[in-house]
Amino acid sequence: MKNFLASRRGIILVGSVIGILAAVLQKLGNPGNMGICVACFERDIAGALGLHRAPIVQYVRPEIIGLVLGAFIAAYIFKEFKPRSGSAPLVRFILGVFAMIGALIFLGCPWRALLRLAGGDANAILGLFGLSVGVWIGTIFLKNGYTLGRTQKTYKAAGWIFPLLMVGLLVLMLLNPQIEGAEKSGILFYSLEGPGSMHAPLVISLLAAVIIGFLAQRSRFCTMGALRDLILFKHTHLLSGIISLVAAAFVTNLIFKQFNFGFSSQPVAHSMHLWNFAGMVLAGLAFTLAGGCPGRQLFLAGEGDGDAAIFALGMIVGAAFAHNFGLASSTAGATTAGMVATVIGLVVCMLIGFTMKERTI
Amino acid sequence: MSKIIDARGLSCPQPVILTLNELKNTTETQLEILVDTVTAKENVTRAVNSQGWQVDKVETLDDEYKIVIYK
């Protein structure tokens, strides 16, 4: 059977659905230009679980759960659920940690960078430029034979673990629902102010994300892959997906009056251009070395890829480090510790790129 | 017997890189590429088509795919 969503028109359709749903989620309560942000939302989950205690970013985001479960459902229906693992998991974990640290210097993953652009936040241009440079560095390593090695087939039950973890988070959330004015409900933390306190209704967030996860698994939507394939092969297939995402989110933002152009007073953003750029160089390089943007890693995890799941867990742990050690930026800008971490991250990623290659490729 | 490129178990975009490198250097007019995910199958198919090669057939073997291409 031909997979329509993997065609050019299919990926354009998927990009626009994501763009529209993201803008709608923002309208329904998610933070500014953050209808969906994989990095920010994993960071909020880390906060809700108490892995870090930054009070303004604590919420078990149903979007993350939905993205994984949507991909899981699609993979099962279309017989693409293939449990696999064992391609340098520790390296992928470390890449996840630094990908998150880089994303939190900029304040957003590639998905949010696109949504920030679609909302008029000009700082996103620096971030997207940095992302492209990071991906470009990654493609040089790929051309020179960089590989984390082959993955292996594993038990069906092993492929279920990450989707089940997501179900577990959902159950935790239903057992410990948000209490008006309380920062803790049972074992979960909630934000009383800041981005963590802003969210669309749980059911809507979850459903929208299941739809996106389903479509993205079928279409192989990947924001990093879009830039990588353009640079490496001059292929524009995935690129058309992210362009349609920006266009659709832009139009929807105009309709909802959520578009506001400029560098200053943008929601959950800062204007330290160099660090918006550098943070995303780090994130882009880490995503390229790991083979997918944070969204794509969730979809892969949903179809049974244990290495992608390890990367996602690395991002959640990276978020905890980022806030516990004061590495994450705020609207006031990047921190000195964050700058140091960016440089360390770049060095680590470059070392991974230089040392992990097969000559035969 | 045509040459076989084994791209099983490799993550994106390595199956495509392996295939394109081989297409660039080969003197053969027929090649086989082994992959183990549908994504890799789609990506490789798209990439070889863009290089003027045609997909002859895709055989499904167990959990893997053998893509036979020719020029």
Image (tube, coloured by chain):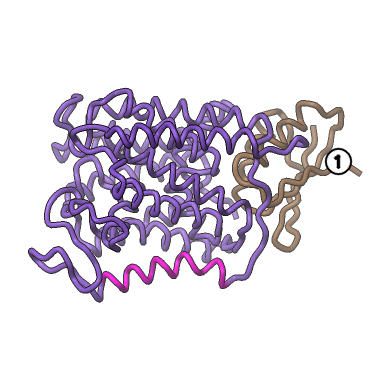
Chain colours: A purple, B brown
The picture places residue A323, in percent across and down from the top left corner, at 29, 48
Quarter-of-image position of residue A258: top left
Magenta residues, start to end: A157-173
Which residue sits at x=45%, y=52%?
Answer: A314
Crowd band around label 1 with a 10 angstrom C-alpha radius: few (<14), some (14–19), many (20+): some
Is residue B45 visible in the rendered structure shown here? no
Tell me where residue A45 appears, x and y as whole percent: 31, 58
Which quarter of the figure has residue A55?
Answer: bottom left
* Residue at the image position 49 percent from the left and 34 percent from the top: A285
The residue at which mark 1 appears reads as B3
Q: Give the camera-side residue of A304 and A350.
A: A350
Residue lying at the far bottom in this picture: please name it. A175
Q: Residue at x 75, y 49 (%)?
A: B34
Left/right placement of residue A341 relative to residue B30 reads left
Q: Nearer the viewer, residue A282 or A164?
A: A282
Foreground: A243 or A125?
A125
- Chain assignment, label 1: B
- Side of A40 relative to A242 (left or right): left
The disc labelled 1 sits on which kind of residue?
Lys
